Image (tube, rainbow, N blue to C red):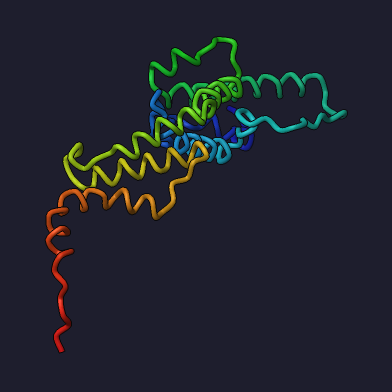
Amino acid sequence: MADASKLHPATTVTNIKSCIPIVLDYEGSQYNNWATLFKLHCRANLVIDHILPPASIAVSSTTTEAAEIAAKVLWERLDDIVRQWIYGTISNDLLHTIIDQEDTAAEAWNRLVHLFQDNKSARALALDAKFTNTKLVDFPNVKAYCTRLKVLADNLANVGHKVSDERLVLRLLAWVIEEYKHFSNNGAKTVLSPIF
């Protein structure tokens, strides 16, 4: 029986989707949330260095050849586990785009980073157009409308184009102005005297 003290925490994860409930897809609207949850999960399970390798790796001169082989075998096993986590939390279309039999977890991770973080200017333009043209009439209720604007604002921030709180509020209230513009036209002509 294996010594429980040598059991690596990453080997005990049985359902990655319960830890990372987001399925990343090509739209990438959840990329930053997905990446944040994934990094947190990797840190908690002591495998963050499989997706974000350290600048330098310390090598001990006192390790035996057998210990080095065992460490290499463990590293490869953990790397495969992390790759399975990546592959298990992305859409099938995205999986077919990034999967490579000889990849390491870091290579798969970096492929996703490049896919979603490159072309920031083009993504920002597209997201800004969606943000600006989002209208309440396209949604079943105000909550869905507000949620969509918040997601678009978060996505713009993710590509380096933060939406100010003032702009977000103005966009949220744009529907009020449209829906009640006939009241403002009539109200603007009437000046009410204070009643004392």
Residue at the (16%, 72%) spot, across then down: 191
Where does the image place residue 76, in percent across and percent down from the top left?
63, 20
Residue at the (59%, 35%) spot, across then down: 4
Residue at the (45%, 29%) spot, across then down: 123
The front one of 162 and 129 is 129
Side of 157 relative to 170 (left or right): right
Q: In which quadrant is the N terminus drawn?
A: top right
The front one of 184 and 4 is 184
Where does the image place residue 6, in percent across and percent down from the top left?
64, 33
- Quadrant in which residue 166 is drawn: bottom left
- Quadrant in which residue 110 is drawn: top right
- Quadrant in which residue 139 is drawn: top left
Total marks shown come to 0
Where does the image place residue 180, in percent across and percent down from the top left?
15, 54
The residue lying furthest to the top in this view is: 101
Residue at the (15%, 58%) spot, across then down: 185
